Amino acid sequence: MTAQIFYEVLIGELTLRSGDPGTSYGLILDSARRTRDPQLFQRATEIALQSRSGDAALAAARAWKQAIPESRDARRLELQILVALNRLPETVEPLQAELAATPQVEKPVLMNVIARNYARASDKKQAASVVEQALSEEVKNPAMAAPAWAAIGRVRLAAEDNAGAMDAARKGLQADPAAEAPAVLALDLMDANQAEAEGLLKTYLNNPKANPGVRMGYARELAQDRRYAESSNQLTILTHQHPELAEPWLLLGSLQAQAKQDAAAETSVKKYIALTQKQEDSDERNPGMTQAYFVLSQTAERRKDYRAAEGWLAKVDSPEDLTAAQLRRAMLQARQGRLDEGRELIRALPGDTPEQRRQKLMAEVQLLRDTKHYQEAYDLLAKASAAEPNDADLIYDQAMVAEKLNRMDDMERLLRRLIAMKPDNQNAYNALGYSLADRNVRLDEARTLIQKAVQLAPDDPFIADSLGWVEFRRGNTQEATRILEAAYKQRPDPEIGAHLGEVLWTSGQRDRALVVWKEAVQADAENETLQETLKRLRVKP
């Protein structure tokens, strides 16, 4: 760098600091052209991007490419800027040039980059068309067809062309049944409710060279869809094939604990802990370790080994999970007749900010509610609400505890006060409407209240559950079934399951009712609504 160039670059940087990016850009770009220095071209582009001048950034990138035609960095930068500017048709030529310059061994990585960058384009349909055009030769190459089709499918998926993405995944796996990229695309399409995707995924997983990460993703998807037995089966295969991987052991143990296979769950989770602790970068505070401690505490509690259960919870030291862990420890103490010690444990949690004090209050209320000490919970909330009379959450929680005490007049008074204070509070409308429906009184008013809640939160499955329940109480069994089926599909909560099961049972669909109730019991056998429903109907699913 000559003295003059050095001086111009220095002036350019000082000019930028003084708030004149336009002059700075011109000086740096002029120096870059004269020196053909890639770092200066890069700097000129950065200045333009920082000042939100897309056209200037593109001009700098193209000047770089013109000065050094063989520079792949210049071409890649040009591509990124063109995509960001949504000038997608102009990207075909530089994209094809980049593909031609990339060694075949590096092309699978490039395909992932292409899919990621073009999926961010504002005009996603045009982006999909451009990528398909640019990769037209790659899909004809047997060695590159699978990752190329996966890239095309990714951009189609971003454009909400699920059928097109499904076709791309199918063609990718036809080109190479052992290719990972189309299989991962199929996994995402399974999440997008494309029925054929699971079949493609299973075919891929039958290959001995299948990537274990894909099987792990499939297991997670199955668990999310409540197909727990199938998920456990995939995890069992995975832990046998790759016993050195930690994560599958944790998910398997969690599912085993959920199925009350406690001995197997403890073995799996302890295997996860041992593998995780062997890793050089292991962190005792990672979310996986916290989940492991909670699972082990749960299994110990079920065999009434409260000391061991508390011991596992004591290991949780991440600030995000400390309150939940202490609440569980307090519950354990309460179950041993040491409620006061449990309450003191919560009160002793660190932190004295208003938010931390509130968290401790709500945790103590939760402890009292869970142990059915409703009067103490009510008094605690009443005291807090007197200090913060405009706190909507405190009023709502106090109303819910009043209901548990069968103080219905107090509950209604509190909820109507909340509605007057916060006319857009859907929970207040829903709670009052559901309470009326559940007691089978003032059903027209209950329906009006719940419909108001639906207007405020149309996608809330619990409000939909209330609407289905009031329709059932009004005798509209067919409509109630439709609403509750949709709510349960969206959120398979035990309480929604209890209501759906009762509606199905009453309408004669008893086999379906038993299936729903069995799922609900597996999720939470102690749910009060579920227990009351099964006891009242004298059913053992």
Image (cartoon, rainbow, N blue to C red):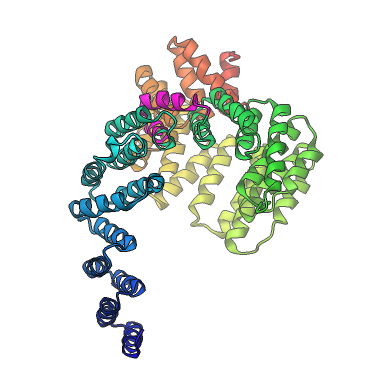
Is residue 232 one of those drawn in magenta? Answer: no
Q: Considering depth in this image, is 323 or 30 the residue closer to the camera?
A: 30
User: Where, by quadrant of the figure, is residue 348 drawn?
Assistant: bottom right
Where the N terminus falls, by quadrant?
Answer: bottom left
Residue located at (63% from left, 25% from top)? 259
Q: Is residue 200 magenta?
A: yes
Residue 102 in view (yes/no): yes
Q: Is residue 527 above or below residue 512?
A: below
Residue 320 relative to residue 112: left or right: right
Residue 255 located left or right of residue 439: right
- Relative to 281, is 182 above or below? above
Spot the residue most to the top: 508
In screen coordinates, is 499 left or right of 45? Answer: right
Residue drawn at point x = 22 percent, y = 55 percent: 86
Q: Please report the residue visible at 55 percent of the width from the left and 24 percent of the height from the top.
A: 520
Between 348 and 312, the residue placed more toward the observer is 312
- Magenta highlight: main SS: helix
Q: Position of residue 439 (x, y in %)?
A: 49, 27
Residue 396 placement (x, y as % from top left): 51, 46
Number of disc labels = 0
Magenta-highlighted residues: 185-208
